[in-house]
Image: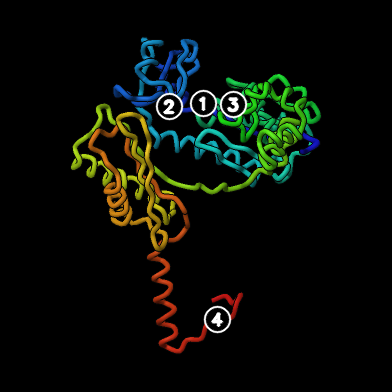
Amino acid sequence: MRGQPTVLHLDMDAFYASVEQAAKPSLRGKPVIVGGLGPRGVVATASYEARVFGVHSAMPMAQARRLCPNAACLIPRFGVYRAISETVMGLLAELSPLIEPLSLDEAFVDLAAGDPGVSTGEEARRTGERLRERIRERTGVSGSVGLAGSKMIAKIASERAKPDGLLLIPPGTERELLAPLPVRTLPGVGPATAEVLRRAGISTIGETVRAGEAELLRLLGRAHGTSVYTMAGGVDERPVVADRDTKSISVEDTFDVDVTDRARIRFEVARLADRCARRLREAGRSGRTVVLKLRRYDFTTLTRSETLRGPTDDPGVVREAAGRLLELVDTTEGVRLLGVGVSGLADFTQEDLFAQANEAGRGEALGTPEPPPGAVG
């Protein structure tokens, strides 16, 4: 934990919807919903004007339209959102080399690592306000900023600052802030952990602290119990990690009507595999494990995976692996969703390794000695 609020959390406000409102003046001040428009479409995000009517992300689009019939419902334009995100991340990079992106519209920044670094609460506040102004000037959209001595508290602060605000939580006041909040607020506390705690009569963070560490160890086990108790006490020692690695790249589609035709399913899997490989190449990455995701007519979800001999970004290789995985799954009763992903990411491909091996082989055949370690060509 830090003695000064030099951890900044930025969370863009209703990002996709705000970008659409900034691009189309006629939408400003009006309810906007971004998401899938088909019968099974899901809300990706809703403007604050739409949220007044109860619309929220992950809600079925049909329900959102019933709640807010006058809303403009738009298909996501991810290319546009990525471009705006790159501009925002560029502004963050001007503050510090330690930036930890969480998504297109959210990131942590270690202000103390900047040049010059921020060292006081007042400097942090001024930096946060300037950042918000520059984001609006450059993109036309707003972001909320939280400042604190740790990542957990900075994120809570940005949520409380929404929309279009800034909140600084002085170090030393964390326990008072956390006490009335639900246990799900804590990092690492998901639905299953929250249910275990609820059954023990623990629903708030304050109650978690009062239960004591020994009780949490009994309920959750040593590692998880210790972590939850420490976080509940307002202590979060997690550093801001720059260039946080993406663990996987994937694409998926939900169908308006259950698909039962096997040939159509094969076609869709091949198409998704090509899209996934294209995203890999655009990101300059490759991967070793191909994953097929399938959601059945009854909402049960299956995943199958195959690990290759080495990383690849070749569409044909991804397509063939996904096709093999499909043969392991029964689709006769219908498919609602299909997805193809690649994990085990690397910055090189198997083809690169073969090329390196061939170069080394040619060097040995010609009698070329290996350069000593550290030599520069």
Residue 340 visible in the current orientation? yes
Q: Amino acid at mark 1?
A: Val
Please state which of residues 82 and 190 is positioned toward the viewer in this rendering: 190
Is 204 located above or below residue 154 in the figure? above
Q: Nearer the viewer, mark 4 or mark 1?
A: 4
Decide which of tag 4 and tag 1 comes sooner along the chain: 1
Give the structural element (helix, strand or loop) at label 1.
loop
Q: CA distance from mark 2 to mark 1?
A: 17 Å
Q: Amino acid at mark 4?
A: Pro
Q: How many residues crowd around disc 1 within 10 Å: few (fewer than 14), some, or many (20 or more)?
A: many
Question: What mark, if any, has residue 141 been given in the picture?
Answer: 1
Q: How many residues crowd around disc 2 within 10 Å: few (fewer than 14), some, or many (20 or more)?
A: many
Q: What residue is rendered at 72% in x and 26% in y?
A: 208
Q: Nearer the viewer, mark 4 or mark 2?
A: 2
Q: Is residue 340 left or right of residue 285?
A: left
Question: What mark, if any, has residue 44 been given in the picture?
Answer: 2
The percent position of residue 174, horizontal first and vertical second, equals 76, 27
Q: Nearer the viewer, mark 3 or mark 2?
A: 3
Q: CA distance from mark 4 to mark 1?
A: 53 Å
Disc 2 + disc 1, Cβ < 8 Å: no
Q: Quadrant of residue 193?
A: top right
